[in-house]
Image (spheres, helix red, strand yellow):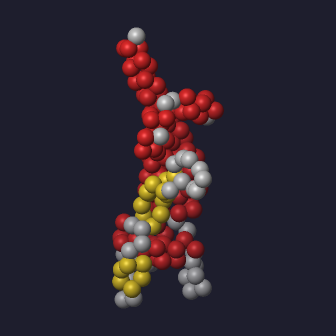
């Protein structure tokens, strides 16, 4: 990893930071893997609790690019639930975010049936390995392209 960071820092800024570069793409790949596992877990948890149809909530579990923390440079990818209002099985208006929170954390009336935390626990190391491999591959392609470009100018 240290060699990768040194290589990223040595690359021209326009190659690496242009709309996120290879880091953004590798993080997005990992976020999509986590999102897919979270969706599968949500369906499974809802089936155990007899929650009925959860398609609205499952379809709103997304992976998206987030803003970097204030004062820092970098990339952030989020796996989150997009807020959408719908009518639940009891006929009450609720949101996908509320439904997902109740499943993950429970309430006084409903036991918790976690779906996001287990997704990370189950696939976390695999996701990190995939992101690392993808980033190494992308950086290698960029360095080869830059070397060929600089070699052709001589």
Instruction: For the N terminus, give its image quadrant.
Output: top right
Q: What residue is shown at x 38% (from left), y 14% (from top)?
A: 153
- Residue 47: quarter of image: bottom left
- Between residue 5 and residue 111, name the one nearer to us: 5
Q: Does the image show residue 70?
A: yes
List x then y, in percent, for residue 48. 48, 73
Residue that extends furthest to the right in the rendered view of this protein: 2
Q: Residue furthest bottom?
A: 91
Height in image: 142 above or below 47?
A: above
Q: Position of residue 16 (x, y in %)?
A: 47, 36
Do we see residue 43 in this rendering?
no
How many numbered marks are there?
A: 0
Find residue 107 and report its horizontal and vertical position in percent. Answer: 58, 82
153 or 104, which lies in front? 153
Which image quarter is the C terminus in? top left
Q: Residue at x 43, y 28 (%)?
A: 141
Vertical arrangement, residue 61 with respect to residue 33, above or below? below
Residue drawn at (44%, 29%) of the image: 142
Residue 149, picture quadrant: top left
Residue 87 lies, in percent from the top left, at 36, 83
Residue in the picture at 43% in, 40% down: 18
| 124 up-or-down from 43: above or below | above
Is residue 46 left or right of 70 when viewed as pictured? left
């Amino acid at each position: 990893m240290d060699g990768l960071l040194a290589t990223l820092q040595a690359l021209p800024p326009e190659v690496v930071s242009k709309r996120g570069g290879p880091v953004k793409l590798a993080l997005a790949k990992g976020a999509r893997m986590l999102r897919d596992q979270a969706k599968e877990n949500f369906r499974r948890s809802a089936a155990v609790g007899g929650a009925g149809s959860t398609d609205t909530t499952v379809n709103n579990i997304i992976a998206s690019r987030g803003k970097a923390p204030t004062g820092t440079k970098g990339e952030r990818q989020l796996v989150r639930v997009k807020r959408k209002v719908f009518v639940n099985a009891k006929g009450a208006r609720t949101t996908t975010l509320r439904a997902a929170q109740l499943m993950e954390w429970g309430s006084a009336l409903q036991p918790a049936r976690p779906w996001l935390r287990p997704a990370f626990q189950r696939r976390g190391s695999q996701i990190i390995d995939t992101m690392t491999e993808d980033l190494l591959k992308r950086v290698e392609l960029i360095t080869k392209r830059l070397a060929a470009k600089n070699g052709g100018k001589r």
